[in-house]
Image: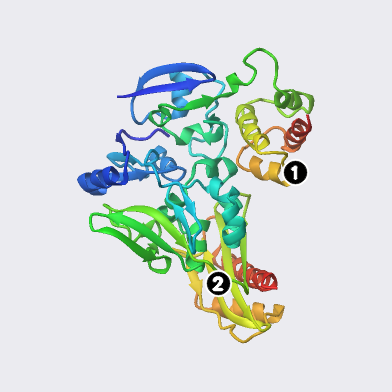
Amino acid sequence: MKPAAFEYRRAQSVDEALALLREHGDDAKVLAGGQSLVPLLNMRLARPAVLVDVNAVPGLDRIEANGAVRIGTLVRQRALETSPVTAARLPLVAEALPYVGHLVTRNRGTVGGSIAHADAAAELPLCLAVLEGAVVVEGPGGRRDLPAGDFFVTHFTTRLAPDELVVETVWPSHGAGWGFAFEELAQRRGDYAISMAAAAVRVDDGRVAEARVGIGSVVDRPTLLSVELAGEELTPAVARDAAASALETLDPSGSVHASPAYQRHVTRALVERALLRAWERTR
Amino acid sequence: MIEVDVVVNGRRRRDWVEPRLLLSDFLRHGLGLTGTHVGCEHGVCGACTVALDGVAVRSCLLFAAQVDGHELLTVEGLAADGALTPLQEAFREEHALQCGFCTPGMLITAGDLLARGRPTREQVEDALSGQICRCTGYEPIVRAILKAADA
């Protein structure tokens, strides 16, 4: 349970981090909060030759809320959890954050690190996908915005190139009429989820105008489901039917704690609950 | 080797470390502070929790090289003058420990929680979800933390 040897480089700026990534390519890993990376190093599931520590890079730990909420990559999950911006502007994230690891790992774990790590069982990538946010990355070609829907490819795999760094995530504003809900089932609080669901519903004139629902921990990446709810009143029966039909084509991977059939059952229940609670919160 | 210059429990310590040396091992083997316990070494059990610049963190998920220029508090720093802190006193009164393996991490985590205001019972239980105890069944620990919050 000790990591293999590596070279430790502490970057003092984004440019210095990018230069180190360019120099070392696939041999380098970025160290942010380290709450996912260091367990992998300790278990020697990852053996990078070089760790590029970005914790000392200034300016990446800000939360800005002019228009969309822009969250610097080094913002600690605990800082986001306690920020008034989150409560006021990102109710879905506020509800999901207590499920992210444990209090002590959230103290250190970063928002950008969770997004870049792209664990299929992570809460923040699912929230970013359901809120139709974006990931801002910097690399040799400059800065680019990647929509969350394209960013997550599969387990621990994103569109991020080895010489690029996530510098910020963008969480769009949702105005009046929207309601959100997050649901998760794990064996114990803070464990990897058996399943999770996040819903965003907009109501206009007493009926659903838009509805998005996504699931995590069930397949290889956070996945938006297809739900046809526009024009409906979101009654329990409607939510139940929508959840059942959205999951028809889904192929849950299953895990040591949950057979694919059980995972499908749980996911259907969580999707149904998330839709209903999001609907209730639009009022 | 990387030079580490760090304040631990109010005392400045300097040493040269290999990059891969975990902070937990640096504390125990480098500085002889064996009150910080090592259980799972992948962030699950919470026994190695210490405070970094006043914030509870897993010392098994940090490298010693990363704490250069920072300040640490370990369980040894709690009753530095020999008198138990109100939190430690509450742990004793409520029988919130038996074998004591998890206690250093419990105390540092609870200290972090209490520093942010009076927690609800639910917040205490949520914080303890990241700290594994195999003796007490947690209930006395929850009681002790809530008691310390009122002290």
Q: Secondary structure at mark 1?
A: helix
B139 left or right of A214 in image: right
Residue A115 at x, y = what percent?
A: 43, 55
Residue at screen point 75% across, 34% down:
B149
B113 left or right of B39 in image: right
Q: Secondary structure at mark 2?
A: strand
Amino acid residing under circle 1:
Arg
Would you say residue B121 is visible in this rendering? yes
B90 left or right of A11 in image: right
Residue at mark 1: B121
Q: Residue furthest front?
A: A66
Residue A143 at x, y = what percent?
A: 30, 58
Please state the chain letter of the residue tagged with numbered disc 1 in the rendered image.
Answer: B
Specify the quadrant of the image occupied by residue B136.
top right
Q: Residue furthest bottom?
A: A231
Amino acid residing under circle 2:
Val
Residue at mark 2: A213
Please state the chain letter of the residue tagged with numbered disc 2 in the rendered image.
Answer: A
> Relative to B57, is A270 above or below?
below
Residue A152 at x, y = what percent?
A: 40, 63
- Asked whether the residues under the numbered discs 1 and 2 touch, taking CB atoms below 8 Å apart as contact, a structural biologist would say no
